[in-house]
């Protein structure tokens, strides 16, 4: 019987679905990299999320491995080229959490534009400051979406009802303009955007693409949104742009370093500056982390295992 190792939290329905396809499933969601390396040799399939690194070393130990399924979107923790060279099919499930991420972004933008977190904190402290918390409307603003895959396109669909001007740029896609979305070149994003939202995978090409030159390219003062990967954005460059008045605010669900804990300011020079920014929202990489997305990701992985014929 073909064995599959599920090394990340998944719903019980996912395990049942794999068993119905004829697999024997080892559900070990708390496993670390070292533990996976020790036992990977016997498995036909591997399901991972971000913490498990599918490196050439691990792949070389996995003589029977025929597929790696990523529960989520980013594939930077998997050496896809090396795996496929070894005959291992690699696939992800970005369709599963795109709606969750898009909704999270809208929530962050509304909070940022209307000072919701700050205003709440003031009221519970006994402060009733109306003029100081006067907000701004999304209607009429221009958002530039960089990367028009599953999440970028989901965000555009949901923003259409806000009567915004929606621009989208994707280096590797074209012909996706619609009634609500204008497909543009990157200079148009820089020229017109009031908000810029990043939706690119982490690759050598996109690593720290949002650097000093990037922020200096905008004609307007912008709100920056990053729900993609932390290392797509240079935090020091963002902070300098905020201090210089080029960036009005930021909504970050991901950071360069996400091992945040008490005392982390002793290790990360930019951390005190980051949390001192007034118009800033940070969430702990939860944009795609909903009950609904967990179920959808599981269903999509099962369907791709069927589609690729990996169960036969």
Image (spheres, rainbow, N blue to C red):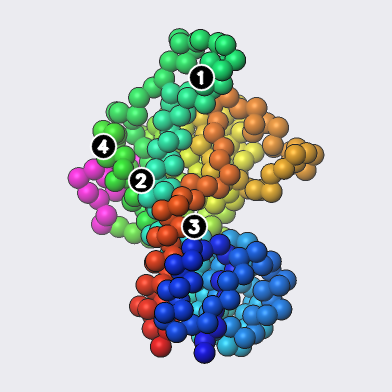
From mark 4 to mark 3, how far is it between C-alphas?
Answer: 27 Å
What x and y, as percent, mark residue 246?
51, 29
Which-is-in-front pick, marks 4 and 1?
1
From mark 4 to mark 2, how far is it between C-alphas?
Answer: 11 Å
Which-is-in-front pick, marks 4 and 3?
4
Q: Which residue is mark 4?
A: 161
Q: Which residue is mark 1?
A: 119
Answer yes or no: is residue 218 visible: no
Q: Is residue 211 above or below residue 41?
A: above
* Magenta-drawn stretch contains 183: yes
From mark 2 to mark 1, how far is it between C-alphas?
Answer: 26 Å
Residue 17 lies in what quarter of the image? bottom left
- Packing grade of label 1 (10 A; few <14, some 14-19, many >=20) is some
Q: Residue at x 31, y 43 (%)?
A: 158
Asked if the residue at tag 1 contacts the one at tag 2, i.e. Cβ–Cβ closer than 8 Å, the answer is no
- Packing grade of label 2 (10 A; few <14, some 14-19, many >=20) is many
Q: Which residue is mark 2?
A: 155
Residue at disc 4, secondary structure = helix
Query: Is 189 displayed left or right of 254 in the figure?
Result: left
Q: Which residue is mark 3?
A: 201
Which-is-in-front pick, marks 2 and 3?
2
| Range of magenta residues | 175-188
Badge 2 or badge 3: first in the primary sequence: 2
Residue 276 lies in what quarter of the image? top right
From mark 3 to mark 1, how far is it between C-alphas?
Answer: 34 Å
Q: Nearer the viewer, residue 230 or 259?
A: 259
């Amino acid at each position: 019987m073909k064995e599959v190792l599920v090394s990340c939290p998944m719903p019980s329905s996912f395990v049942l679905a794999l068993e119905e396809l004829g697999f024997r499933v080892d559900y070990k969601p708390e496993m670390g990299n070292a533990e996976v390396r020790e036992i990977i040799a016997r498995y036909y399939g591997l399901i991972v999320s971000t913490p498990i690194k599918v490196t050439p070393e691990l792949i070389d130990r996995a003589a029977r491995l025929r597929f790696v399924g990523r529960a989520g979107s980013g594939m930077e923790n998997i050496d896809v080229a090396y795996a496929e060279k070894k005959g291992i099919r690699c696939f992800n499930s970005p369709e599963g959490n795109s709606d969750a991420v898009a909704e999270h972004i809208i929530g962050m933008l509304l909070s940022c534009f209307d000072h919701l977190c700050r205003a709440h904190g003031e009221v519970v402290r006994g402060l009733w400051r109306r003029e100081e918390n006067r907000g701004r409307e999304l209607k009429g603003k221009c958002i530039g979406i960089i990367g028009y895959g599953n999440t970028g396109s989901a965000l555009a669909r949901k923003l259409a009802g806000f009567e915004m001007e929606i621009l989208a740029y994707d280096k590797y896609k074209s012909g996706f303009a619609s009634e609500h979305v204008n497909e543009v070149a990157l200079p148009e994003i820089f020229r017109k955007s009031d908000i810029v939202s990043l939706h690119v995978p982490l690759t050598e090409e996109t690593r720290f693409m949002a650097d000093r030159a990037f922020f200096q390219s905008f004609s307007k003062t912008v709100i920056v949104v990053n729900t993609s990967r932390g290392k797509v954005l240079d935090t020091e460059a963002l902070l300098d742009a905020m201090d210089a008045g080029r960036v009005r605010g930021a909504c970050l669900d991901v950071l360069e370093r996400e091992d945040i804990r008490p005392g982390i300011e002793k290790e990360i020079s930019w951390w005190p500056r980051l949390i001192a920014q007034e118009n800033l929202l940070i969430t702990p990489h939860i944009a795609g982390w909903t009950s609904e997305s967990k179920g959808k990701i599981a269903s999509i992985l099962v369907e791709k295992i069927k589609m690729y014929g990996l169960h036969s």
